[in-house]
Image: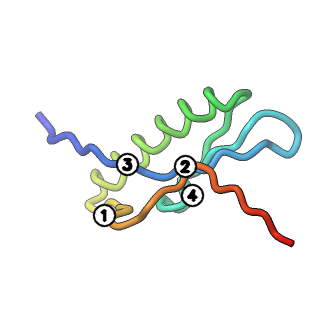
Amino acid sequence: MADLINMKYTIIIEKGKESGYVAYAPALKGCVSQGMTKAEATRNIKEAIEVYIEALIEDGLPVPTEVGKDTIEELEVVAK
């Protein structure tokens, strides 16, 4: 049985240009997905990340991490 890898990644969800939402993981170059709702985009990017990491492992490549990174959910900025 293969060892399980449990990692956390930052994902960005943006409103699509025409419809729905686009989600991507900046630490995983090219790992992008989409969905009609934010929840669907989140589910889809989670699956995409899992497949992405499995492919890296199968190819013997290193799995990127986000160690030492602080995450802020939302930051409100007021400029004069």
Instruction: Give the labeled residue for mark 2.
Output: 11
**Which comes before the other along the chain, label 2 or label 1?**
2
**Which comes before the other along the chain, label 4 or label 3?**
3
Residue 30, disc? 4
Q: Are marks 3 and 1 in contact (CB under 8 Å)?
A: no
Tell me residue 17's x, y (percent): 86, 46
Q: Amino acid at mark 3?
A: Lys
Instruction: Give the labeled residue for mark 3.
Output: 8
User: Mark 4, residues whose alpha carbon is within 10 Å: few (<14), some, or many (≥20)?
Assistant: few
Nearest the eye: 76 or 31? 76
**Which comes before the other along the chain, label 1 or label 4?**
4
Residue 61, disc? 1
User: Is residue 49 shown above or below 39?
Assistant: below
Label 2: state its secondary structure: loop
**Which comes before the other along the chain, label 4 or label 2?**
2
Judged by depth in the image, the label closer to the viewer, 2 or 1, is 2
Q: CA distance from mark 1 to mark 4?
A: 15 Å
Q: CA distance from mark 2 to mark 3?
A: 9 Å
Q: Residue furthest bottom?
A: 80
Left or right: where 10 falls relative to 69:
right
Label 1: state its secondary structure: loop
User: Is residue 80 shown above or below 54?
Assistant: below
